[in-house]
Image (cartoon, rainbow, N blue to C red):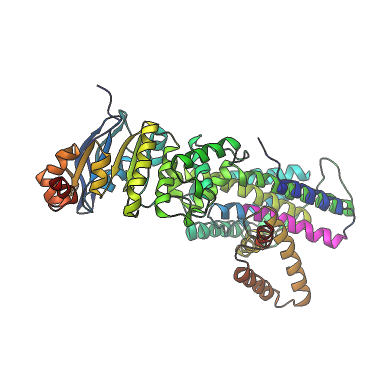
Amino acid sequence: MSTPILQTKSLCRSFGAVTAARDLDVTINPGEIVGVIGSNGAGKTTFINMVTGYLPPSSGQILFEGRSILGKPPRAIIRMGMARSFQVAQLFPELTVLENMLIALVAAEGPRPSFFLPMASAKRMRQAKELLAEFGVERFGDSVVSAVPQGARKLIDIAMALISTPRMLLLDEPTSGVSVEEKFGLMDTVMRAVRHHGVTVLFVEHDMEIVERYVSRVLAFYSGEIISDGTPAQVFADEKVRELVIGHGHGTEKKRNMA
Amino acid sequence: MIHIDRSMVGLAAATLILAAAGGFVPDWLAFILTLALAKALVVQGVVLQMRAGLVSFGQGLFFCVGGYAVGMGGHFFGINDAPVLLLAGALAAVALAAVLGLLMTRYRDIFFAMLSLALSMILFGVLVKSSELGSTDGFNVHPATFFGLSFKTEAYKTALYLLTVLLAGGGALVLHLVHHSGLGRMWEAIRENEIRVEYLGLSPRWLLYANYLLAAAFAALGGGLTALATGHIDPEMSFWTTSGEFVFIALLGGTSHVAAPMVAAVLFAFVRTYAIEFTPHTWQMILGFVLLGIIVFLPKGLWSLVRSEKRAKA
C-alpha cells in the first residue's frame, strides 16, 4: 500500500475556550480529489491553515508523504511539495498578472533569487504566458491584478500555486466570490489543470453542487470534528450531515428526488 | 544573460558626462555635486528599502558609520587611501547591519521606521559621550590618497568629485540590475503581499535582510564620501534629522528609477543652498513647501514626470 500523501493524527487546535479542531485523523491518498464541507466555524480553514504551517496545532501529528511537517514554516512545507490557494486570492495587486506569474516562477527555481539576472527572461516569459493560457486568463497578462475580475484572480492564484509543481494542492473555497455563471467554468479549468499536473487536491467548499460534481471523496466537518467521510453520495445521504451541515432542503437532494 | 537597456546606456552616459565636467565646473559647483551625489548613494539605500515596503528613519546610522570609519581609519590606524577607507566603512556598516538586521527584519511599517530611528539615536548618544572621538564637535578627517596617489588641494577636490561620480553612477547601474532581477522584484512582491511570498516557498525575512545589508553598504559609502569632501565628521551624521533628509530626498525623486535619487539629491542641494543664501532664517520652511508641493502634485516623485512623458509618447 502506498504512503498516504497527507496524514493527520489526533490533530487538535483551540482558540481559548473554542475548539476549532478536535482529534482529527485524516488520511489522503495520492491522486484523490477530496472536498471538505462544513458550516461556518466548523474548522475547515483551521484544518488547511494547520496543514500548511500557517497555524500551529495545539497537539497532534501532521505527516506529508510520511514525513512530519509539524513546526515547519509554510515556505518549508511548500518546498516539500505542497501548495495552497486562498479564500481571498493572495496576489500582488499593484503588479501585472504577468509579473505575478514571473515572480512565482522565480520563487519556484529556488529560495535564493538572483540579484542581477533579470526576472523577465525569455524562458520565464514563455512559461508564464503558457500557464496563463492553460488557465484561460492570458488576456489579462498586462493588466494590473487589482483591475482583474474576481474569477480570473482566483484562477491566477491557483495557477501561481501550481507553478512550484506541487504533489498536493489545497484550495480554500475556490468558487467563493465568483458568480453562479462563472463557477463551473472556473472549476472545470482548475480540475483540467490539476489532472494535467497529476496533483492530489483537497478543497474546502460551501457549494454542494461543486462538491458533488468534482470530488471523489468528502469530509464533513462540524464543530471541529469530522462527522462523515466517504463518497459524495454516502456523505450527502448521512443523516447527521443533512441535519448539521447541508440541511434537509439542500439542492442536491431536491435534484436527486426530481430525477 | 544581462540585457543592456536604455536606462543603463543613459546612466553610463550621464556618469561619463558628469565625470568629464569635473575638469570644467567651478569649485563651488563641484563641491555641491560631490555632496549631493554622496547623499544620493545613501538615498539609493532608502529607496531600496521603500521598494520593499520599508521606510527607514535611521539610515543616518550607517551614513555615520561610513563617515567615522573614514575618519578613524586615517586618525587611529594610519590608513589614508580613499578607496580602502570607503571599503572599510562599507564593510563596517554591513557587519553592523548583519547584527541589527536580525532584529530589524522582524518589524514592518511604523515599527521598523521607529526602531531604525532609535538605533541611529543610540549611536548619536554614544558618539556625543565619546570624548576620544571629539564628542559633539567630532573631529577633522585627514586628506586621503587615491589608489596611492596624493593630490594638492584643487586636484584633490577634482579626484574626490570623480570618485564620487563614478561610485554614484556605478552604484546606480548596479542597483538598476538589482531592481530588475529576481531578488529585486521579490522585494516588491514582499511590499505587495508578504504572505504570498511565504507561500511561494521563500522567506520574506531573509530577503529583507539582504535588502537591509545592501542599503547599509550604500549609506556607508555616502557617509565616507561626505566625510572626505567636508573633511570633518561629527555625531550629527547619525541624528534623526539627517535620516529625515534622506527620506525627504527619496520622496522628492520617487522610487521608480535609480536615477531619481541622484536628480532629487542634486535638486535638494541647490534648493537648500539657495534657500539658506536668500532666506537664512526660514530655509526650512522653503524645504517644507517643496515637500508639500511634491506630495500633493507629484505623489510618486519627480521621476513620475519622466514616466508620464514616456507614457504620453507611447
Q: Is residue B231 visible?
A: no
Q: Quadrant of the C terminus of chain B?
A: bottom right
Q: Is residue A21 visible?
A: yes
**Of the pair B37 and A226, the residue shown nearer to us:** A226
- The location of residue A33, given as percent across then percent down, is 28, 36
Residue drawn at 59 percent across, 41 percent down: A120
Residue drawn at 24 percent across, 47 percent down: A209
**Of the pair B201 and A135, the residue shown nearer to us:** A135
- The location of residue A121, given as percent across then percent down, is 60, 38
Q: Which residues are magenta?
A: B26-46
Q: Say if the magenta span includes residue A23.
A: no
- The location of residue B228, given as percent across then percent down, is 77, 53
Residue drawn at 80 percent across, 48 percent down: B144
- The location of residue A130, given as percent across then percent down, is 50, 38
Q: Is residue A244 above or below residue B117?
A: above
Q: Main secondary structure of the magenta part?
A: helix
Tell whether B176 sits left or right of B79.
left
Tell whether A189 sits left or right of B216.
left
Q: Say if the magenta span includes residue B39.
A: yes
